[in-house]
Image (cartoon, rainbow, N blue to C red):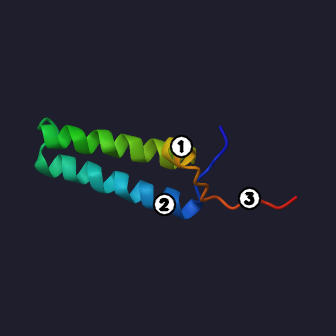
Amino acid sequence: MKRNMHGADRIVRAILAAAAVWLAIAIGAATPGGVVALVFAGIMAATAAGGFCPLYLLAGRVSQRRKLA
């Protein structure tokens, strides 16, 4: 899969993932809200690490700048 996210998007997602983990710990990881926060953190971390967002693909959005050839 080609990357479709810009570096800034990836950084924001990594920060959101860390914040969601902190939130899950603060409210209790075993609570329903904690589980939702951990799932959200996992999705944000995976898309930040891979540089690919399936929702961007569905929406037709590409935030990564392409080189003109």
Picture coordinates of residue 45 (x, y %)?
43, 46
Residue at (88% x, 58% y) in the render: 69
**Tag 3 residue:** 66
Residue 58: give its label: 1
Q: Earlier in the sequence, mark 3 or mark 2?
A: 2
**Does residue 35 sit above or below 4 in this rendering?**
above
Which residue is the extreme one toward the bottom? 8
- Left or right: 60, with 36 as reference point: right
Q: CA distance from mark 3 to mark 2?
A: 19 Å
* Amino acid type shown at disc 2: Ile
Mark 1: secondary structure: helix
Q: Earlier in the sequence, mark 3 or mark 1?
A: 1
- Left or right: 3, with 38 as reference point: right
Mark 2: secondary structure: helix
* Amino acid type shown at disc 3: Arg
Mark 3: secondary structure: loop
Residue at (11% x, 38% y) in the render: 31
Q: Is label 3 or label 1 in front?
A: 1
Q: Earlier in the sequence, mark 1 or mark 2?
A: 2
**Tag 2 residue:** 11
* Amino acid type shown at disc 1: Leu
